[in-house]
Amino acid sequence: AQSVTQPDIHITVSEGASLELRCNYSYGATPYLFWYVQSPGQGLQLLLKYFSGDTLVQGIKGFEAEFKRSQSSFNLRKPSVHWSDAAEYFCAVGAGGRRALTFGSGTRLQVQP
Amino acid sequence: DGGITQSPKYLFRKEGQNVTLSCEQNLNHDAMYWYRQDPGQGLRLIYYSQIVNDFQKGDIAEGYSVSREKKESFPLTVTSAQKNPTAFYLCASSDAGQGTDTQYFGPGTRLTVL
């Protein structure tokens, strides 16, 4: 069975500082990996995804993520955080074939001025 | 605009009532999904449908029912058998026909039991 771990429940960074959110997955084959962002009371918005190819993936809003097979990780990064980035971030893994995703428990990002 | 709509945004239910949450998509996606989100937790899968007239139970299907009579619609019924239904419910659909299984989400319905 596949699983996702997001070790950090809550992270606080200063505006303009760099950000890295951690995600570790467990899956037997090459996974489909996703990062989503959720503002309070809203649905999830896709930030980026990895299926194959280049292990460094660029997404929207200046985010990027790197797939490291040897570490079973797919960490999300942003070089300079903006106050509008405050939200909850979810990592997810999928097996393909129209099957559902497995989500981590999320990391809540707070941005200090 | 293409997208996924969920209604209502807020729903209140009395003990013992069944309620139905609506999910509609005009993205021409074959697959649709229902997730439940509780505070401090990730999303948990309730039901999913890979094609019209077919659906499968997810991890927490007990107390819920679905139907998939049309490609664009996947309503979720929360029955009185669901002991703790207060939660945020999210519907999603995926463009699995492209082989990428990227899921797109609706804005959610917050259900509160009174």
Image: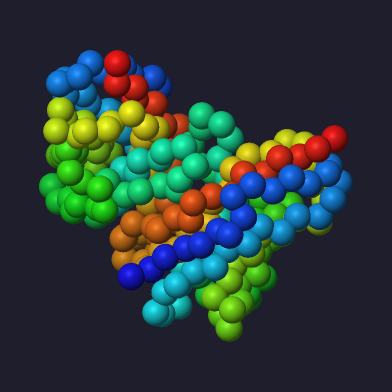
**Between residues B12 and A51, which one lies in front from this camera angle?**
B12
Where residue B106 sits, quadrant-wise, is top left
Q: Quadrant of the N terminus of chain A?
A: bottom left
What residue sits 19% from the left and 38% below the top? Answer: B64
Q: Residue B82 location, x and y as percent?
A: 20, 34
The colour style of the image is rainbow
**Between residues B41 and A16, which one lies in front from this camera angle?**
B41
Where residue B13 sits, quadrant-wise, is top left
What residue sits 21% from the left and 23% below the top? Answer: B19
Q: Is residue A73 above or below residue A105?
A: below
Q: Residue A13 location, x and y as percent?
A: 78, 46
What residue sits 21% from the left and 33% below the top? Answer: B83
Q: Is residue A47 above or below residue B63?
A: below
Question: How many dots with numbers?
Answer: 0
Where residue B11 sits, quadrant-wise, is top left
Q: Is residue A74 left or right of residue A28?
A: right
Q: Is residue B54 left or right of residue B91?
A: left
Q: Is residue B14 above or below residue B5?
A: above
What residue sits 23% from the left and 16% below the top? Answer: B14
Q: Is residue A16 left or right of residue A84?
A: right
User: Is residue B30 in sight in this rendering?
Assistant: no
Q: Quadrant of the C terminus of chain A?
A: top right
Q: Residue B111 location, x and y as percent?
A: 34, 25
Q: Is residue A97 left or right of residue A75?
A: left
User: Is residue B84 in sight in this rendering?
Assistant: yes
Q: Residue A78 location, x and y as percent?
A: 75, 55
Q: Is residue B43 above or below residue A3?
A: above
